[in-house]
Image: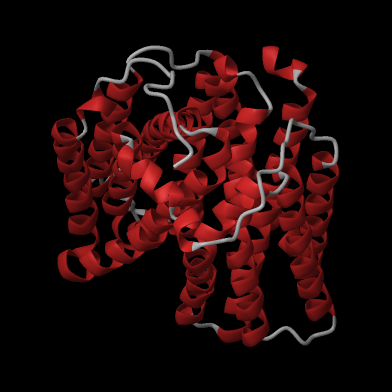
């Protein structure tokens, strides 16, 4: 593959996969340990909230940092902080002083670090490969991430047999591997002129997206599609009460979207999107909505798995188009701040989407919630066809207009 010629990209890909796998294992271990300590679903929810709340607070600052500092080193620092958190958890587990407060406090640290890592990570990729190879690089990167999302929790599940400490020790090793891989990542970095950190400079990414109709349409479409159409939070109810497949079936249901996304990412790495990218994004969001309706109405476990896998594949098309457009349309000096806004939207859609699913399920039941969400996604796609014609008409991954630093 042509991308293998770019050693910095290969090292970055290895670091990203290792770091993502470690983070997935770490969060699974924290959740399991919290439930073991307190047996409280509320405390499990607090772990998620503890990671989301600081992300909202620091996202704009994280984007500013990604535009000012060496991005590979910034990602490396984030991996180092996560490794220290893992080391503390390992010591707490072995020393038998792990507690609810310790787990929540360290979750807050992880939540504050993640925006810095994601902003720098997204903004770094375009500097490692030629712009013509960026769509393929995005797909290869997404394939690695999805593989880590699938493999990390699966490996952690096997290691739990040997004890939670073994899971934390493995996470520590993976974070170390990620950091070592990043040491070899070199790219042309010219530090920007020193300027004070102001609210105006941090909001530059928000203003840039607001002025670019194609970017605004792509980012907001993904936000509302996942916000309305996600069903992850309700999968335990479907596994237990509707499909009657138990914990084993729940694991398969949780994995199905990631499997579909991985297969699609591998396909797009081999055959990158070249024409009609805006239209394909719209179609993929509509397919995602249809899959949610099918899943909500299905009483067949096999059909439900297929619907979720296809939804993951469709979502991956949308993700690749959105992320590629964000990087191509944005000047390098602003990629960190724009990526920070994109990351915040992703976090909001996932976290708030779970809340929306739970709230509507309380009113409409789980089936009604998922079906209504799928229909809502279809309505959003139809509305965006009218509101964001520059996105719909976007043909290729090429900068549409001269970009300014804002």
In this picture, residue 370 sits left or right of residue 127: left
Residue drawn at point x = 16 percent, y = 64 percent = 364
In this picture, residue 354 sits left or right of residue 379: right
Residue drawn at point x = 77 percent, y = 64 percent = 168
Q: Is residue 314 above or below residue 233?
A: above
Residue 240 appearing in the image: no
Residue drawn at point x = 54 percent, y = 68 percent = 51
In depth, the one of 328 and 290 nearer the eye is 328
The quadrant of the image that shows the C terminus is top left
The quadrant of the image that shows the N terminus is top right
Residue 376 appearing in the image: yes
Q: Position of residue 203 (x, y in %)?
A: 44, 55
In depth, the one of 164 and 203 nearer the eye is 203
Give the tally of numbered discs.
0
Q: How is the image coloured?
A: secondary structure
Residue drawn at point x = 48 percent, y = 29 percent = 324
In depth, the one of 35 and 100 nearer the eye is 100
In depth, the one of 168 and 159 nearer the eye is 168
């Amino acid at each position: 593959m042509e991308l293998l010629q770019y050693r910095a990209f290969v090292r970055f890909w290895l670091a990203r996969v290792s770091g993502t796998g470690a983070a997935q294992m770490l969060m699974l271990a924290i959740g399991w340990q919290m439930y073991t300590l307190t047996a409280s679903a509320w405390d499990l929810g607090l772990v998620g909230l503890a990671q989301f709340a600081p992300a909202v607070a620091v996202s704009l600052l994280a984007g500013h940092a990604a535009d000012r500092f060496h991005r590979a080193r910034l990602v490396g620092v984030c991996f180092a902080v996560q490794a220290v958190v893992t080391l503390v958890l390992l010591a707490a587990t072995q020393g038998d002083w792990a507690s609810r407060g310790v787990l929540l406090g360290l979750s807050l640290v992880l939540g504050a670090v993640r925006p810095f890592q994601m902003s720098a990570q997204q903004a770094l990729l375009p500097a490692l490969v030629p712009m013509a190879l960026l769509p393929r690089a995005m797909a290869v990167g997404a394939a690695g991430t999805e593989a880590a999302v699938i493999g990390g929790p699966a490996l952690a599940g096997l290691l739990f047999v040997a004890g939670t400490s073994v899971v934390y020790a493995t996470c520590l090793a993976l974070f170390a591997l990620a950091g070592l891989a990043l040491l070899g990542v070199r790219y042309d970095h010219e530090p920007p002129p020193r300027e004070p950190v102001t609210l105006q400079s941090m909001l530059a990414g928000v203003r840039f997206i607001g002025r670019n109709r194609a970017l605004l349409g792509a980012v907001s479409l993904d936000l509302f599609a996942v916000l309305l159409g996600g069903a992850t939070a309700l999968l335990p109810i479907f596994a237990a009460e509707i499909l009657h497949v138990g914990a084993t079936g729940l694991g398969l249901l949780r994995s199905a979207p990631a499997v579909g996304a991985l297969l699609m990412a591998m396909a797009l790495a081999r055959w990158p999107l070249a024409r009609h990218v805006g239209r394909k994004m719209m179609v993929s969001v509509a397919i995602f909505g249809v899959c949610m309706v099918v899943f909500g109405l299905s009483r067949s476990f096999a059909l439900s798995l297929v619907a979720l896998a296809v939804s993951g594949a469709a979502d991956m098309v949308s993700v690749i188009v959105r992320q590629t457009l964000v990087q191509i349309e944005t000047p390098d000096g602003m990629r960190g701040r724009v990526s920070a806004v994109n990351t915040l939207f992703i976090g909001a859609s996932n976290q708030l989407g779970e809340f929306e699913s739970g709230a509507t399920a309380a009113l409409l039941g789980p089936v009604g919630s998922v079906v209504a969400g799928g229909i809502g996604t279809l309505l959003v796609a139809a509305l965006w066809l009218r509101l964001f014609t520059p996105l719909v008409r976007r043909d290729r991954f090429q900068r549409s207009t001269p970009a300014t630093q804002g």
